[in-house]
Every structure is written in C-alpha cells, then in structure tokens.
Amino acid sequence: MRTLQLFKDRENFEVIKTTDELLKLMKSKHPTGSFKYTAAMKCEIIIAQLQYRRDCLNRVLPPGSMCSGFKGTAEAKLRELLGNFKECIKDEV
C-alpha cells in the first residue's frame, strides 16, 4: 500500500533521465539572468530523483547514496550527489 501511495504522489513527477538533462536544469536562469537554484536546492533535486528511483522503480541504491549524513559545504555535497546520480543512471535505458 505504501509503494502505491508513493507512486501516486509522484505521477506528475518529472523524471530526469540523463546527466545532461540534470545539468541543463541546474544551469537554468530566471529572465533576470540570475540562476534559479542554489546549491542546496540542486542537492534537493538530485535527492528527489534518487528517491524516485528507489521508491518507485525499486532500485537498490548503495548506502550513503543520498548523502544524508554528509558534513561539508552544499557545493561539496552537490558534487557527491551528482556522482551518485551518474552511477545510478549508468544502467538505465
């Protein structure tokens, strides 16, 4: 039942399928020219993508993939998460 609810909650969830798509989203800007997302917001985007794969696609992620216990700057966490995302989507078609 919990899995079904998670799936329904994410029916309109935009799944990012490639690293290029992810990087394009992260580099997007407002009409004013400023970036849309801070480093912390980018981390949340990647975490949401990993959670979707874990919860809805039943992917088994290595321990620490979502960097929940990470200590350091948001930029360092972002680099780590980006690497984990790349690893996760390697075998996706």
Image: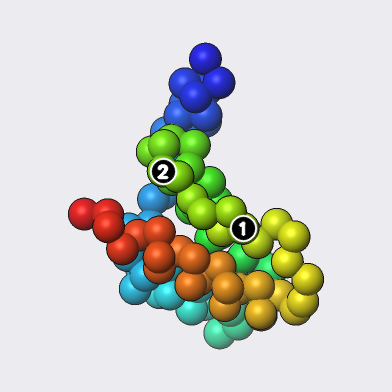
Residue 16, how many percent across, how many down? Answer: 38, 57
Q: Residue 59 carries which label?
A: 2
Badge 1 is on which residue? Answer: 64
Q: Distance between the Cα atoms at labels 1 and 2?
A: 14 Å
Question: Are discs 1 and 2 less than 8 Å apart at CB?
Answer: no
Residue 92, how many percent across, how many down? Answer: 27, 54
Residue 15, how many percent across, how many down? Answer: 39, 50
Q: Please, is residue 54 above or below residue 23 in the view?
A: above
* First-in-chain label (1 vs 2): 2
Residue at the (49%, 24%) spot, across then down: 3
Q: Please, is residue 18 above or below residue 78 in the view?
A: above
- Residue 20 picture quarter: bottom left
Q: Residue at the right extreme?
A: 71
Q: Could you say whether the residue bearing mark 2 is in a helix, strand or loop?
A: loop
Instruction: Inspect the image, locate mark 2, and give the three-letter code of the amino acid beneath it.
Output: Arg
- Does the image show residue 30? no
Residue at the (41%, 43%) spot, across then down: 59
Instruction: Inspect the image, locate mark 1, and give the three-letter code of the amino acid beneath it.
Output: Gly
Is 19 left or right of 60, judged from the image as shown? left
